[in-house]
Image (spheres, rainbow, N blue to C red):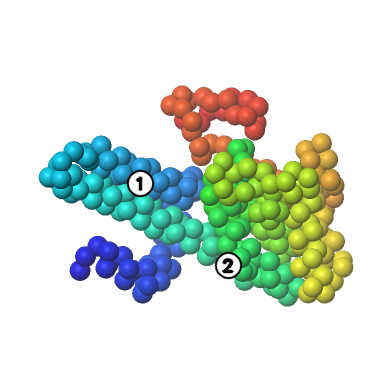
Amino acid sequence: MSFYTQFDFIINICVVGDYINQDLIDDSISRNILNLVSGTMTGLGILGTFIGLTIGLQQFNTGSASEITNSISPLIQGIKVAFHTSIYGMVFSLIFSFVYKNKLEMLVNGVKTPSLRTLLKKIFSGSFYEEFCKNPAGMKLHHAYLGGLLQHSVDVTELALAMAEAIGNTDKDLITAGALLHDIGKVKEISSGMGFPYTTEGRLLGHITMSVLMVREAAMELKMPAAALQQLEHIILSHHGDQEKGSPMACATKEAFIVHYADEVNSIMNQFDVKESKSAWEYNNMMKRYLMVK
């Protein structure tokens, strides 16, 4: 069976989830590596495409008919390198994207409050869900890579729930909903295109405002109780902590403080995941200080 036939079989017949041991991945792969795999593999796939085509074109001779004929084989080999590398990059990217999609689904299904669970399922569906899963969480500062928004949202939720467990006497369902939804406006604020540019809507309204508007629209359609919606909106409006940091409201509830600090810690820890030089120390623009990133 040729490679192409095998690949077609895998894509059309196999279910990726059947071959992934979630517990083994969590135990064996560090979170830092997991955060980088999706973007790295996609980047390698694109790089492999250019390398393969470059190799083939460098050896292509446009002289006589016989020279052209002799040049076709190296060109085809180069195209094969490009194709294979791109496929491998996409496959690995899909696998690790699946890991986080599975985590998101488990978090949503773990919400016991019917109104919050229904709201989450409504928002994380259809074309918006697909955009959410591939969008970056930032242009430059943190999780600025494809799939970064999904990873950041899931990681913040898991960290917030761990904090809630240690603190006690908190509404974990509200924390889960607030953490998963706190940055959904970034799907409209930041484009997933080359360079992750800000959209006009994003520059005019900002992701916090858009996140609240999106949640309110979905909640109104579901006739969600006003009191519960206010608590959820407060978490989103205050997730930057203070007005000096860009939040329209300062944290005023236990759940809001927990989501805020989980968001802040996860954003800071992401700075240690991406090294831009071989030096042990790097100046970090988000933190405005040197960080030891060895």
Residue depicted at 82% across the width and 70% down the height: 220
Nearer to the camera, 117 or 56: 56
Residue depicted at 66% across the width and 70% down the height: 121
Q: Earlier in the sequence, mark 2 or mark 1?
A: 1
Residue depicted at 62% across the width and 37% down the height: 141
Q: Which x, y percent locates residue 252?
A: 85, 50
Packing grade of label 2 (10 A; few <14, some 14-19, many >=20) is: some
Q: Residue furthest right?
A: 226
**Can residue 90 be seen in the rendering of this structure?**
yes
Numbered label attached to residue 59: none
Q: Is residue 280 above or below residue 220?
A: above
Residue under numbered circle 1: 49
Q: Which x, y percent locates residue 41?
A: 41, 48
Residue depicted at 65% across the width and 31% down the height: 287
Question: Left or right of 56: which side holds 204?
Answer: right
Question: Which element type, helix, strand or loop, lies under badge 1?
Answer: helix
**Can residue 241 be seen in the rendering of this structure?**
no
Residue under numbered circle 2: 105
Amino acid type indicated by mark 1? Thr
Packing grade of label 1 (10 A; few <14, some 14-19, many >=20) is: many
Question: Which element type, helix, strand or loop, lies under badge 2?
Answer: helix
Q: Which x, y percent locates residue 118?
A: 71, 73
Question: Left or right of 210: which side holds 71?
Answer: left
